[in-house]
Amino acid sequence: MNAREYSSKVRPGSAVRWDRLELAAFAQHPEVLRKSSATKDSRTVSPWQWAWFIPVVIIAVVFALAPLLGLVAVSGGGRFATAAPERPLAETAPVAGVFFLCAVVALVVLIVLWIVRGKPGVARGFGLYTFVFASLTLAGLLLRGPEESVNMVWSIPVAIAAGLGGVLTVLLFVDWVRRLRADAARKPGDPPVLSPQAAALKEQLQSRLAHLSGSERDAVKSDLDAAIQDLEQRGLITAAEAERARSTELGGLAIRMGSSSATSRSR
């Protein structure tokens, strides 16, 4: 089924799925729109690989929970939601310090991965999470520590974690403000601001399209134009949507238009 055949099956009141329309147009060239994640490694995982995988997962979970566990150690006296007697802060402060030392290591690793890969990943989110729990823990240590004879050296990793988390939180806030301003500055009909993932996908699409001949690309474009014209003539999309779809470069229809037509959904 090509794009024109797909458009003919769209009925009034139903959403125009631009992603499916584009898939239909590339039915003869499915490799162009294949997802990178769709290629799976069929190799079996050996017992030795599992032997490494399980400890790594356990360590990752401990490091991810470290800020929370550090706060619990200080605020809950090291009881960790059990019925055990509350322990003195002088005994639980080192536990909190060790947990936040783990959090610092995790933050540094995430920042290095951000620099190497060029993508923040979960660094900023983990930074916000660490900043909140480290700040609460540090406040508890500073308020209660001097009265309970706490060795305040254990507050150092907590303070470092709060500092690194604070920097990442600021970066997260700056990126959020930038996105809000970009959305406010956009005019109707402007292409959406692509996320790093969408931009990478677009680059992959253009690379795959380069392997098609000129006649193959023209055939796909003609099929899409015919489908768009059919949808416009039957009132399933607006003239503005049709024009925006026609002006979209080949392979980027679903990225620019979204998964479905807002006009159709509002009917």
Image (spheres, rainbow, N blue to C red):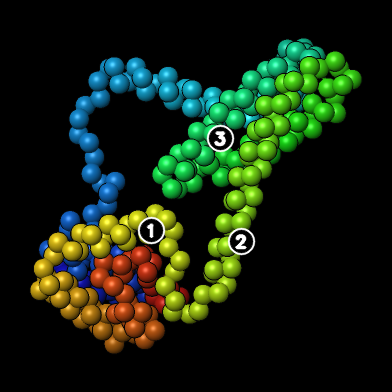
Q: Residue 108, located in which quarter of the rendered image?
A: top right
Residue type of the residue flagged with mark 2 = Val
Residue 41 higher or lower than 212, as above or below:
above
Say which of 83 and 219 sits in front.
219
Task: Provide residue 104's location: percent of width, then percent of height.
Answer: 60, 30
Q: Residues within 10 Å of mark 3 (few under 14, many from 20)?
A: many
Residue beneath the point at 45% across and 48% down: 119
Q: CA distance from mark 2 to mark 3?
A: 23 Å
Quarter of the image that includes the N terminus = bottom left
Residue at the spot of label 3: 107
Task: Provide residue 103's location: percent of width, then percent of height.
Answer: 59, 29
Residue beneath the point at 21% across and 26% down: 44
Q: Could you say whether the residue bearing mark 3 is in a helix, strand or loop?
A: helix
Q: Residue furthest right?
A: 147
Task: Provide residue 168's location: percent of width, then percent of height.
Answer: 60, 45
Say which of 234 and 167 sits in front.
167
Q: CA distance from mark 3 to mark 1?
A: 26 Å
Residue type of the residue flagged with mark 1 = Ala
Residue at the spot of label 2: 177
**Closer to the N terminus: mark 3 or mark 1?**
3
Say which of 29 and 109 sits in front.
109
Q: Residue 248, located in which quarter of the rendered image?
A: bottom left
